[in-house]
Amino acid sequence: MTTAAELQTVLTVPARFRGPEGSANGGWIAGTVSEALHGARHDSAVEVTLHAPTPLDTELSLRHLANTTTLTDGERLLVEAITVTEEFDVPAFVPFNEAARAEGGFAGLVEHAFPGCFACGMRDPGDGLRIFPGPVSGTGLIAAGWRVPMTVTDEDGAVPDAIVWAALDCPTGWAHFKPGEFALLGRLTARLRRRIYPGGTYSVVARASGREGRKLFGESAIYETDGTLVAAAKAVWIAPA
């Protein structure tokens, strides 16, 4: 039963926005649930916990109650988002040309566990985001030059939050991965400061920030070509046992 204070809608994830085969890209679904929580506001950080993989092409329940939004498949909790007060220790700016050169060292070019991933997979140009972060020489950073496809836009002509979250997501994992290695996103906390526009060029930068057992920690940021910070995130990944 839905109370008067609770808003409930149906969400179906199109197969285009997959990460691992058969399930949603973690950043995309985190951004989708985040946007359901706080709308178009960009002054708050949102923490999104992924409790289970989100299936594709399935009717799911998206519920917003007070300061929490959840996504469920029947009674099973998939995703939960809450507004948080969060300070981000962002990776340093890498100029676009340098970030683009770093793509040649992307570990996924050698072996990619999820080559169909919407954000970092080997998808056709315009279909996926094709963000291929590689190591930046002389630093502990990885980076990619993001050329935003014209095929990702909303009714206002800007890039939806879910796409920006997807761009922030995968680099925090690749900061750890060697060719063929993988983990699954467990939590992503992000704050979007400015809008991103199709056809634009941005630097996506990430770094590994620690490891505890199977938990991998990473941080990422998106910058405009002049070094203006657009968005920042911190992530927790769970490596296979």
Image (cartoon, rainbow, N blue to C red):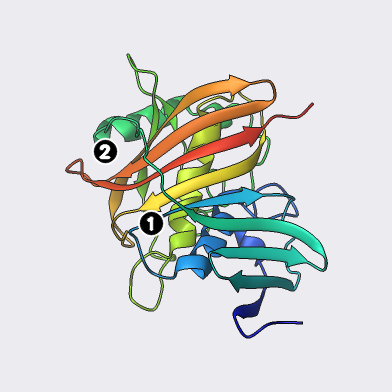
Residue 98 left/right relative to 218 = left
- Residue under label 1: 44
Quarter of the figure with the C terminus: top right
Query: For this rendering, which residue is in front, 67 or 154?
Result: 67
Res 82 → quadrant: bottom right
Identified at 51% across, 61% down, the residue is 34
Name the residue nearer the viewer: 160 or 153.
160
| Amino acid on which the number 1 mark rests in the picture | Ser
Using the image, determine if residue 114 lies above or below residue 24: above
Q: Find numbered disc 1 in the image and state the secondary structure of the residue it sits on.
A: loop
Q: For mark 2, what is the residue? A: 96
Does residue 107 appear in this view? yes
Between the C-alphas of marks 1 and 2, the distance is 27 Å
Question: With respect to residue 135, does 229 lie above or below?
Answer: below
| 63 up-or-down from 109: above or below | below
Specify the quadrant of the image occupied by residue 226. top left
Characterize the local packing of mark 2: few (<14), some (14-19) or many (20 or more) Cα atoms within 10 angstroms.
Answer: many
Which quarter of the image is occupied by the N terminus?
bottom right
Say above or below: 204 vs 214. below
Tell me where residue 73 appears, x and y as whole percent: 78, 65
Q: Position of residue 5 (x, y in %)?
A: 59, 80
Which mark's residue is nearer the viewer, 1 or 2? 1
Q: Residue pushed farthest right? A: 75
* Residue that lies at the very extreme toward the top in this rendered image: 138
Residue at x 43% of width, y 43% of height: 233
